[in-house]
Amino acid sequence: MAWEYYLVVMLVYLGTDLLAVWGLNLEFGVSGVANLAYIVVVAAGAYTFAICTLGPSSGNGGFQTYIGGFTLPFPLALLAGALAGAVVGTLIGVTGLKRLRQDYQAVAMLVVSLMVATVVSADTGFLNGSAGLALIPNPFADLDPEVARWAYVAVVAFCCLIGFLVLRRFTTGPIGRTLRAMRDDDTAASAAGKNVIGLRLVVQAVGGAFGGLSGALLAGFIGGWSPSAWVYIETLAFLSCVIVGGMGSDRGVSLGTLIIAVLLLQGVQFLPQISSSPGLSEDFGWIILGASTIIFIWFRPQGVLPERRPRYLGKSSSHSPG
Amino acid sequence: MQLIIEAIGFGIATGAVIALGAVGFSVQFGISNILNITYGSLMTLAAYVGLLLINHGVNAWLALVLGAVVVGVVSVVYHRALLAPLVRRGTRAIAMVIVTVSAGIILQYVIVSIAGPESHSYGEQSGSTLHLIGFTLSAGQVAIIVLTASLMLGLHLLLTRTTLGKAMRATSSNRTLARSCGISTDRVSDIAWLISGSLCGAAGVALAITTVSFDFSLGSLFLIPMIAAAVLGGIGQPYGAMLGGLIVGVSSEVAAAVSNPNYKDVVAFMILIIMLLVRPRGLFGAAWSTRRLMEG
Amino acid sequence: MSGDAGTVILDVDRLEKHYGGVHAVDGVSFTVERGSITGLIGPNGAGKSTALAVIGGYVSPTAGRIHFDGADITGYPMHARARVGLVRTFQMARVFGNLTTIENLLVAVPRQRGESAAGILAGKWFWRGEERQLVERARALLDTFGMSTKADDPARTLSGGQKRAVEIMRALMMKPKLLLLDEPMAGLSPSLSRQLEDMLIRLAGDGLSLLLVEHELDTVDRLCGKVVVMAQGRVLSEGRMAELRLSREVQDAYVIG
Ligand SMILES: Nc1ncnc2c1ncn2[C@@H]1O[C@H](COP(=O)(O)OP(=O)(O)OP(=O)(O)O)[C@@H](O)[C@H]1O
Ligand SMILES: [Mg+2]
């Protein structure tokens, strides 16, 4: 049934978007690193998943060329995707090794994103260039298609559950507090003994793993992955979820993902189609996305559900010793 | 050897366009401390304005001038209406970058929804081929080199010989101090955005003239060599950006000639990353630019 | 601590910091005794803040060496200096604006269990105990500074004087050996700065060493044993405030500077 298929697609997109947005929120909303190359870690996860599950490049009549082709089982390929995201995320973090202004570093990352896309598109022997990779095996191909779809939803849900538990370990408690302090004022944070550069690299690795897992799950579901799927502006879609939902707030950015990634970007597909220009609704999606980001930065930079801080008031403040 | 000499000639032509863009970008950063990523999409806008004019029979060089004027005015309005108020509201630099990226995407997709996603071309604009001191260049390329050189000279005279230029430099290096010296910094920054916006527009049309065909991604891809040039020269410093543009242009054309043309931008990118890690204040960076680039 | 009194905790040796052609610090040498309050004074632009920034590790020196507590720390990054007990505050108070006041104090403690890899892996039970103790310490500090009622307010909503107090409390949470203070009284009301003076004297009595940049010479007189006078990047003179006031050289520097 069509609606059921559509529901599955929406759920998988929601799950993969949530993972990516959580990772980016950890980097940007919580730690203050505006990783404008975030989509590159998603792509790293997707490509790694693809070359791990696909057979050797010569298979299928050799119509696509790529490195790897390891025919690994699904769970291992997912792990490899997350790991690739972590490695690439850390490499992107190298742009921040010098204590540069944050906006300057963000622009450097934007250039990284443009550059990686150009190189991967141009080199057909590496990851099949701009045509991208197709026929990425579905792990549940042997099952009844109906069951297979819901099985995939279950896998995504499970990854989200694990992801959320891991995420909370970083965004709450003393480490969450330290990362937020670094975001608010990184100079004062290093004066308070925090190794800002080290923490940023760790955060880039963890956030990268989230993005990588997201990309791997997406590639496994769609069955294909190409440079058109990870243009630099895709990062802005995730950033927009963070900003609209509430920077630094795990609940907030989850709501933001629901609003932006699912309702808005999928919703524009229901706009009346103009037959002469079929891409128009997608163009509108991007325009609305950019506009909502700016509107929120102007009117409500804290987002729909702002970050909340724990309270420590109570019992013993009146009878402290001495 | 001939190959390399020709590549150097090409590189100077490419470098001229990069310099044109990088200088405008640097002037904007210098005057308002904003890294304006919308710059790329504004170049695209200029290219499409030029296309519209050329399709209506306007001469390519007149189209360049008109494109420059249009984007110059749009830039002033954009800064006045969106960027300056946001800065006044205390928006952090990092959020400003996200705003300019968002605005760039909006502009890019407005262009796509009007002009469509397909590639366009100005048609044959390069004119006859010229042989100059071993270089083989089209008349169009030579014209762009001459144009860039004269614009840079004009900017140099403006910055050094006029009161306005001195006010611009003063505002760049210390805005509050400039204001307390009686300089009307708002007016100065309007003029600076008009000038830098015009350079952006001129660079956009010049880029479209020198490429075979272009689409809506013209400006965003140009961000790679342009930012590399600006960083190489010490971002915020117009003279550095001129030389930076030339270095990036020549080295990427030479690299493209001796290896794979697909990797032209890789050289620019490597320059950018190395500069960021080794000498982020640029080759000739002054102390004040270091202070502005390092956090705190 | 008092057993070590009299020995040197900080030894600055021919320190230089150049910004292009500007020699902001131009061959400065001095020492700070353990448990003492040492003053650093001089006219505007003398290079005091720059000297403090170099000692604190915020900028790296062009030349010279810094010894702290017996170790050469010249190459240490700022956070490593903070961890060995060399802590600084800023001329413009800096707080973590979106954290609450009490969180600003809690976050400052180095090497917390909850920040470590083990703490992240193991979860709350691993760091809960330590956290409880830190909260107690932070509450006690807030009490002594009279800021308990602000404990759960976001730090960005505090007044300038309160932010400065937060910065000093944050530094104290780190249990420093030497505290570098850049004009801590600036922007405080007269009564608050008297309170802070008393507090600093008490801290020094408990064995904390202080290096204090201050414009108000009467304050320096009351607080500091030794005073180092800087002008144009160099040390002009060194001694007790009462003697320095009489020095021709120092008077000239203040007039010209
Ligand atoms: N990052 C920098 N780049 C260039 N010059 C600098 C920089 N920091 C300080 N200076 C210069 O170094 C000199 C010393 O400055 P510094 O702030 O250390 O003086 P100060 O003694 O703290 O003055 P004040 O009493 O006003 O705080 C000044 O001339 C200043 O302009
Ligand atoms: Mg000072």
Image (tube, rainbow, N blue to C red):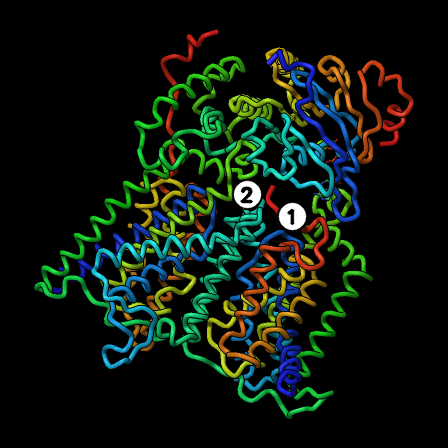
Apparent side of residue B14 relative to residue C16 in the rendered image (left or right): left
Give SS at disc 2.
Answer: loop
Q: Residues within 10 Å of mark 2 (few under 14, many from 20)?
A: few
List x then y, in percent, for residue B71.
Answer: 59, 67
Q: Is residue A15 above or below residue C79?
A: below
Q: Residue furthest bottom?
A: B128
SS at mark 1 in the image: helix
Left-right relation of C190 to B71? right
Say left or right for C222 vs A134: right
**Point 53% across, 31% down: residue:** A192
Chain of the residue under label 2: B
Answer few, some or many: residues within 10 Å of disc 1's Cα (few below 14, many 20 plus, some between 14 and 19).
some
Residue on which disc 1 sits: B292
- The chain that hosts pointer 1 is B
What residue is shown with label 2? B89
Q: Amino acid at mark 2?
A: Arg
Q: Using the rendered image of the protein, determine whether residue B139 is visible from the camera's viewpoint.
A: yes
**Ligand 2 lies in quarter:** top right
- Residue C89 position, x and y percent, is 61, 28
* Residue extending farthest left: A144
x and y, in percent, of residue B87 in the image: 57, 47
The C terminus of chain B is located in which quarter? top right
Q: Quadrant of the N terminus of chain B?
A: bottom right
At x 72%, y 30%, the residue is C12
Count numbered badges in the picture.
2
* C174 over A15 or under it: above or below: above
Name the image quarter holding residue A59.
bottom left
The amino acid pointed to by label 1 is Arg
Instruction: Work out whether A13 lies above or below C110.
Output: below
Residue found 42% across the figure and 54% down from its top: A89
C202 over B102 or under it: above or below: above
